[in-house]
């Protein structure tokens, strides 16, 4: 009896084991099939892009003009016009010793070009030497002028800003005047002076000082050359007396000035500045005639100076691609 019970017990245990193995195999097959279906199931493109965007948002980028720039942790990335770098650099534009290699705050020199337009309040001074018939005379012409030009320069990183060296070329409107005296509708005396085709070519040195990440002030000076085409004409009809002469004046020129800079981005800056500009004296020989006969010569010295209010648009690395 005892033996029969033992055999029955073993048979029951074997049956339970077989049922459990079958159930385990069935559940395993179901799990594998479910995993295969999840792997092979297509993922919509929009959902994939959303997942990628979420992944990118885990490491946000901050613009260099953000107010909380210095308070951000070093694990995030600062965006300098598409060029990112770790924040532990903590450098500003043109800071010497900066380890960041982005174009804005890297330690290497930066080439730039700029366009210039502005108002020029010019003064043309005339000094005529004395002759046997006329005393020495001095007069001046003051006139607002338009000026335009451009520069090619390179900026070097220095503490708190740039040191900029540039070559500048500009042109200016003509300056001059004309007067005449009439009697009974007839002109009996007239005089005119004019300086046209004004130009200047300068080498400038400017020092920028950062006030904030977006604003800077600067000052500096430049030397070079400048000139204009000068012409003078005088006539007195009652005695048929005339004096006239013209010459191309070119002389040493210099300027000094300063201004304010708004750094729109790491590659574009707007510059509003003031400059005092001067061209050295030039000499023009005047020939006089009386009734058609030579009446001697005299010289007329001219010099030009101006106060200028200029707006410049400066572009760094102009031939580098834009993002």
Image: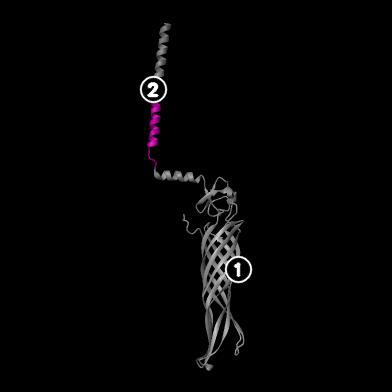
Q: How far apart are marks 1 and 2 (CA)?
A: 96 Å
* 73 lies above or below 309: above
For this view, does 134 lie left or right of residue 12? right
- Image position, residue 289 (x, y; %): 53, 90
Task: Return the residue nearer the eye: 281 or 37.
Answer: 281
Q: Give the range drawn in magenta.
A: 25-43
Residue 28 position within the rendered picture, expressed as x and y whole percent measured from the top left:
40, 27
Assign the magenta stretch its main secondary structure. helix
Asked whether 30 or 249 is in front, the reply is: 249
Give the residue number, with chain letter if any, for mark 2. Answer: 22
Residue under numbered circle 1: 256
Label 2: state its secondary structure: helix
Number of other residues with Cα within 10 Å of mark 1, as a class: few under 14, some 14 to 19, many 20 or more: some
Residue 15 seen in the current view? yes
| Residue at the spot 40% in from the left edge and 13% down from the top edge | 11
Magenta region includes residue 34: yes
The x and y percentages for residue 128 are 59, 83
Picture quarter with the N terminus: top left
As drawn, the label of residue 110 is: none
Instruction: Give the left or right position of residue 143, taking residue 5 as reference.
Output: right
Q: Which residue is drawn at 48% across and 44% down?
A: 55
Instruction: From this view, report whether residue 104 is shown above or below residue 232.
Output: above
Evaluate whether residue 233 shows in this view.
no
């Amino acid at each position: 009896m005892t033996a029969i019970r033992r055999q029955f017990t073993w048979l029951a245990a074997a049956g339970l084991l077989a049922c459990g193995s079958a159930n385990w195999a069935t559940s395993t097959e179901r799990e594998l099939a479910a995993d295969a279906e999840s792997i092979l199931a297509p993922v919509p493109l929009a959902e994939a892009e959303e997942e990628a965007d979420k992944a990118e948002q885990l490491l946000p980028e901050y613009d260099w003009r953000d107010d909380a720039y210095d308070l951000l942790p070093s694990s995030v990335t600062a965006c300098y016009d598409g060029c990112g770098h770790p924040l532990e650099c903590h450098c500003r534009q043109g800071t010497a010793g900066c380890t960041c290699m982005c174009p804005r705050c890297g330690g290497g020199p930066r080439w730039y070009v700029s366009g210039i337009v502005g108002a020029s309040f010019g003064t043309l001074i005339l000094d005529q030497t004395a002759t046997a018939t006329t005393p020495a005379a001095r007069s001046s012409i003051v006139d607002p002028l338009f000026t335009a030009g451009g520069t090619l320069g390179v900026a070097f990183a220095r503490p708190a800003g740039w040191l900029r060296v540039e070559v500048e070329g500009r042109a200016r409107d003509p300056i001059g005047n004309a007067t005449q005296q009439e009697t009974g509708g007839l002109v009996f005396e007239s005089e005119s002076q004019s300086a046209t085709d004004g130009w200047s070519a300068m080498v400038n040195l400017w020092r920028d000082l950062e006030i904030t990440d977006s604003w800077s002030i600067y000052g500096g000076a430049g030397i070079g050359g400048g000139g204009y085409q000068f012409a003078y004409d005088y006539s007195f009809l009652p005695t048929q007396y005339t004096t006239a002469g013209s010459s191309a004046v070119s002389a040493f020129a210099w300027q000094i000035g300063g201004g304010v800079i708004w750094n729109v981005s790491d590659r574009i800056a707007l510059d509003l500045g003031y400059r005092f500009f001067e061209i050295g004296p030039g000499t023009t020989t005047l020939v006089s005639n009386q009734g058609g006969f030579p009446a001697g010569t005299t010289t007329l010295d001219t010099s030009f100076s101006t106060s200028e209010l200029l707006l410049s648009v400066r572009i760094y690395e102009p031939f580098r691609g834009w993002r």
